[in-house]
Image (cartoon, rainbow, N blue to C red):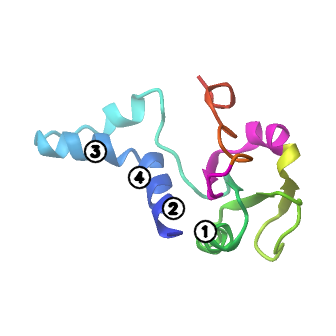
Amino acid sequence: MAETPLGLIIALARNFPDSVRHQDQSRWAQQELWDQPQHLTRIKWPVLLIVGYGSIGHELARRAKAFDMRVWGVSRSGKGDASLAEKIVSISQLHEVLPHADFAVVSAPETSETKHLIAAPELPA
């Protein structure tokens, strides 16, 4: 489970979807990809915010550290295994830390407490 969000982060950071579309058209479009508004980016040192820093979130953090990502966790209590996360905050602080995240992954189960936790107002335009 932890590999899927990391794979998607890499795919989006390097714009694999558009790269594949260009390849399907037999086009070399590296400059076009670079010039798009969502620039290609490296995933070294960005902040990965893991909302739901339980067992799956911890495994995602372990894998993200291999890419030198800075991991912040969000849990109900604000506590968790800090061996991989440089910061762990409580769910009540989510809206304070969300703007600082380069990538955010929700690995919390859907409950009445987590439903609509992140919606349009929390996402950048």
Q: Which residue is mark 1?
A: 60
Q: Which residue is tagged 3?
A: 19
| Magenta-highlighted residues | 94-111
* Quadrant in the rendering for residue 85: bottom right
Q: For residue 17, which quarter of the picture?
A: top left
- Give the CA distance from mark 4 to mark 2: 9 Å
- Local crowd at mark 2 within 10 Å, few (<14), some, or many (≥20)? some
Instruction: Classify residue 42 as left or right of residue 123.
Output: left
Q: Which of labels 3 and 2 is toward the front?
A: 2
Is 76 located above or below residue 62 in the figure?
above
In the picture as drawn, the residue positioned furthest to the top comes out as 125
Alpha carbons under labels 3 and 2: distance apart: 18 Å
Name the residue that disc number 4 marks.
11
Q: Which residue occupies 58% across, 67% down? A: 67
Looking at the rendered structure, the secondary structure element under dot 1 is helix
Looking at marks 4 and 3 on the same chain, the residue that comes earlier in the sequence is marked by 4
Q: Position of residue 56 (x, y in %)?
A: 62, 70
* 125 with respect to 86 (left or right): left
Instruction: Identify the amino acid type marked 2.
Output: Leu
